[in-house]
Amino acid sequence: MKNILIVEGNLREENQSFSKVGIQTHTESLKDSLAHFTNELKFDVVNPSSDQNIQLISDKLENYDGLIWGGSSLNIYDDTPEIKKQIEFMKDCQKKVKKILAICWGMQVAVTAAGGQVKKANNSHIGIANEIKVNKNGISHPLYIDKDRKFNSPAFNFDEVVKLPKKYKGKSIVIMDGPFMCLDPYGDENHVLGNVKHAIHCWNNGTEAFWPHRYTKYINKGVIENPEPELTKIDKFIETGKQNKTYACKNCEDTKIKREKCILIRSTFIETVNKNQINLPIFSFYFLKSDTIIYKKISAFLFFLFIAIRFSISLFLNLEFQHQKGCLPYLKNVF
């Protein structure tokens, strides 16, 4: 039996209003949803804004296997006494609870408690989100097994995270599981999103770089705000990251370090592979080391020799280099 603490984000008066008109509170909805999938969870509920015994809960936070912090109608930048209580309780939770699921308001409290900043969004989402699509990972998840592949859901979002906690500043994130992607700091508040495949717009071989005329106005211009859709390719970045998943080979599954190295190599290889210039040397080397028959070894060696000669002539005799012209979309306030 797992012990789960659910934190109520709304004030007690708000929940009483819900109950009067027959609407479940967020906490009740979470409990029912989880109970639908398993009976192996024991729930405790706490409201940091209203409960008088909040310190008793704080003292035994280590006893919980996980914590779920739900939504709220509050705005964290209002900085009321009730909100301050929630922020202080979150700070305790971040020190003592290993697994925290922060949903909507919960995420805003978590970011603020860690030193980040939340502000009112320029464009709020109010109403219904239409045609939400369940992706490949979602189809196999228990939460979506009985759902349609497309569905609608209420959507109310008024605020957004605009500043990272200080401990994340200057940190780069590399996503190895899937296409090789990275998130690198750019200045004080911006991050640059990179993708090994879609960041490259064009390339050429030769001693000098050249590019299609339509890119000229963007060259050496630094950060470009509101660029033409064809330039950013950010949608392709995100879509590729969602759809592709790379696993370690069977020979590298025994340790975490070997798995991570294998995933990095395989994902990078899959996204950047040029079959004529990369596959053949790799397979040639494989066959030369294998126990296969001699004529296959000879074929592999000849393939490898052909690629090596072609590369050498191109690089050293003609002095040709491949120039890749890429554009990396920058994301301000990523988290």
Image (cartoon, grey):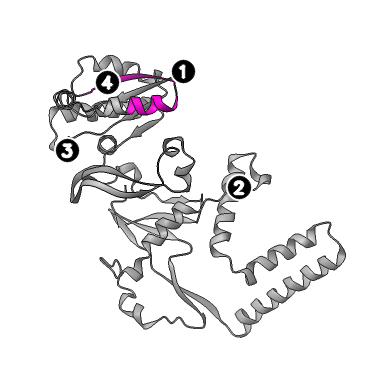
Return the disc, 2 or 4, that comes first in the chain's sequence. 4
C-alpha separation, residue under disc 2 versus residue under disc 4: 42 Å
Pointers 3 and 2 in contact (CB under 8 A)? no
How crowded is the residue under tag 3: few (<14 C-alpha within 10 Å), some, or many (20+)?
A: some
Per the image, the residue denoted by label 2 is 248
Marks 2, 1: nearer the viewer: 1
First along the sequence among labels 1 and 4: 1
Residue pointed to by mark 1: 1
Residue found at x 36% / y 50%: 170
- Say what amino acid the circle numbered 3 marks: Asn
What is the number of the mark on residue 75?
3
State the SS at label 2. Answer: loop
Closer to viewer: mark 1 or mark 4: 1
| First reached walking from the N terminus: tag 3 or tag 1 | 1
Of labels 3 and 2, earlier in sequence is: 3
Specify start and end residues of the magenta stretch as a single range.
Answer: 30-49
Q: CA distance from mark 4 to mark 3?
A: 19 Å
Residue 162: in sight, yes or no?
no
